[in-house]
Amino acid sequence: MHEGVEGWTIDGSSDDPQILADATALLDQELPDPRFVSTDYLRWAYRENPLGRAWERHQHVAEGGGVKLVAHYANMPRRFRGPGGASSDGAWSLNAVVDHEHQRARHFSRIGLEIYGEAGALGRSFVVGVTNEKSTGAVVKYMGWRLIGPLPVRVVAPIGRGRRRMTHAEVTPAWLDSEAFSDVAATVDRHAVEGWATDYTADVLRWRLACPQARYFVHQSDDAVLISTTTKMGPVPAAVVLKVFPTTAGSARIDATPAIRSVTRWHRATFAVYAGFNSSVRVRGVRPPRRVQPSPLNLIVRHLDPTIDQDAIQLDTFEFLDMDAY
């Protein structure tokens, strides 16, 4: 319990299934998404991460003669790799949600600061997250985050030269246990980086691609491996490029646009969407105005270790696979 904040907090140390069930219901109520149809998604995110268990907080209040979950937030462990083979154990921020009838009651700020303190005490360096326009100002002002800026978005049409030699595979449990996955995992994420980027070891990549209620595809060309999914924007089918892994040696940036065109055609999609940035990759496409994007996202970062200068934290790569939008 915390002075001035209604109710009490439960952390994530208990395996009581009702805790994840209540969190799933609150997320589905406030942020509806197909992933919140069962507790499978939160169990995968919080309990099955090969890097360890998430730091969770569940804020409850007494209401109507019972107990109600009114706020939930989590940070999951993440390892980052940096220039010269450096590595850093940090975190990823996700699932910040407050019941609409309990807004502005300090629930989120209280449980957030508690999570950051716990993760920092365990040696975690910094945490990365994304937030919408509405929430950005509050988390920067009251919770110590630094705004890096809006995620750039590119829309790529399937018109133009593609890649002739590409292989395509759907990610299935059998594929994740196959030699084909082992070959991909041994090839990707070996290029040099200029700043911090998610470290996709084989175990981390296998876990990330096993996300429940998600459907992923892997595409291989001579110089890159791409991860994609599909969506619909109204009645229009679209491909979504979640990740581009360069697989060639050298410091020159690869142009992923031809491969993205081929992926779009393979999906029989009208266009492809790529969001984020990668210092080793160039994606040529149209920049849609932020006002027409369904939910423009801002990239934010916060130190967990107070001795770290968070203004000096520079990210090399951040793409859809590095977050939880898909």
Image (cartoon, helix red, strand yellow):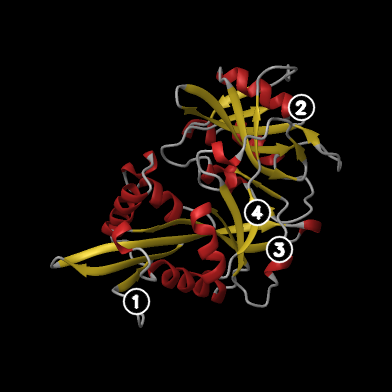
Q: Which amino acid type is marked by label 3?
A: Ile
Crowding at label 4, few (<14), some or many (≥20) Cα neighbours within 10 Å? few
Q: Residue at x 35, y 70 (%)?
A: 105
Specify whether 149 is left or right of 119: right
Q: Where 189 sits versus 53, above or below? A: above
Regarding mark 1 in the picture, which secondary structure is present there?
loop
User: In the rendered structure, which disc, 4 or 2, sits on the residue that comes first in sequence?
Assistant: 4
Q: Residue at x 34, y 72 (%)?
A: 9
Q: Which picture quadrant has residue 35?
A: top left
Q: Which amino acid type is marked by label 4?
A: Gly
Camera-near label (1 vs 2) is 1
Q: Which amino acid type is marked by label 1?
A: Val
Camera-near label (4 vs 2) is 4
Regarding mark 2 in the picture, which secondary structure is present there?
loop
The residues tagged by marks 1 and 2 sit, at their Cα atoms, a distance apart of 56 Å
Residue 296 at x, y = what percent?
55, 45
Regarding mark 4 in the picture, which secondary structure is present there?
strand
Q: Are marks 3 and 2 in contact (CB under 8 Å)?
A: no
Q: Where 253 sits versus 61, above or below? A: above
Name the foreground residue: 73 vs 48: 73
Q: Are marks 4 and 1 in contact (CB under 8 Å)?
A: no
Q: Residue at x 33, y 65 (%)?
A: 14
The residues tagged by marks 4 and 3 sit, at their Cα atoms, a distance apart of 13 Å
Q: Which mark is residue 313?
A: 3
Regarding mark 3 in the picture, which secondary structure is present there?
loop
Camera-near label (4 vs 3) is 4
The residues tagged by marks 3 and 1 sit, at their Cα atoms, a distance apart of 32 Å
Crowding at label 3, few (<14), some or many (≥20) Cα neighbours within 10 Å? some
Tell which residue pokes out farthest to the left in this image. Answer: 65
The residues tagged by marks 4 and 2 sit, at their Cα atoms, a distance apart of 32 Å
Q: Where 82 sits versus 171, above or below? A: below
Residue receiving disc 1: 5
